[in-house]
Amino acid sequence: QSVGDFSVTNALLQPGQLHGIERIQPAIFAVQVALAASLKAKGVVPSALIGHSMGEVSAAVVAGALSIEDGVQVICHRAILCRTLVGNSAMALIGMSPAALREDLARRKIGDVEIAVQAAPMSTVIGGSMESVQRLVAVWQKEGLFAREVAVDVASHTSQVEPILVKLSSRLSGVTAH
């Protein structure tokens, strides 16, 4: 609770408290780190760790590369700053390979949408301006392609988060990797 204005414990125990990127991401981080600590207490110790997206912060804490305090700083400051980006972007899961998707975006002359995640060979997540992503999802669905908007507040993994990078870097200047 040292960063942010809410208690993760209260948010997890009280219905309706867990909404918004600035609350959801710290809560997920806390659950991930707590689960790893519970497993360790039972004698389950991983020989390797990998995290995806914000899970990289949890993995770094569990691996000992970041202290729990520094992990909290990273996840909370990132989430709080991402809150300032809410409403400007969107993400969608598309049933296309990245190469086919790049060609399709180029053919349509779409410059404000980019590949965010390659989830599987024929499953790619895009992110970009809300208007363009929503328009593309509708078009692809009409063309018979699998296209579904992802329920997120911010198009992470894209250039949409660049406006927060300078502030985030400043706020995390005291974070030290071990």
Image (tube, grey):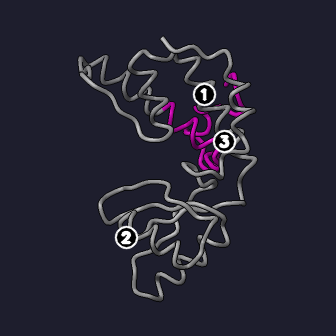
Q: Helix, strand or loop at disc 3?
A: helix
Provide residue 126's location: percent of width, then percent of height.
51, 62
Q: Nearer the viewer, mark 2 or mark 3?
A: 2
Q: Nearer the viewer, mark 2 or mark 1?
A: 2
Task: Decide if residue 101 is on the left or right side of residue 16.
Answer: left
In which image quadrant can residue 122 be found? bottom left
Q: Which residues are magenta?
A: 1-30
Q: Tell me which label, 1 or 3, sits earlier in the chain.
A: 3
Q: Tell me which label, 2 or 1, sits earlier in the chain.
A: 1
- Mark 1 highlights which residue? 74
107 magenta-colored: no
Crowdedness of circle 2 by 10 Å Cα count: few (<14), some, many (20+)?
Answer: many
- Mark 3 highlights which residue? 22
Mark 3 is on which residue type? Glu
Task: Decide if residue 75 is on the left or right side of residue 142.
Answer: right
Instruction: Give the total number of marks visible in the rendering.
Output: 3
- Mark 2 highlights which residue? 96
Q: Are marks 1 and 3 in contact (CB under 8 Å)?
A: no
Q: Please tell me which residue lies in front, 139 or 1.
A: 139
Q: Please tell me which residue lies in front, 165 or 151.
A: 165
Q: Helix, strand or loop at disc 2?
A: loop
Q: Please tell me which residue lies in front, 59 or 129.
A: 129
Which residue lies at the image location 35% right of the left edge and 66% below the top edge? 97
Crowdedness of circle 3 by 10 Å Cα count: few (<14), some, many (20+)?
Answer: many
Mark 1 is on which residue type? Val
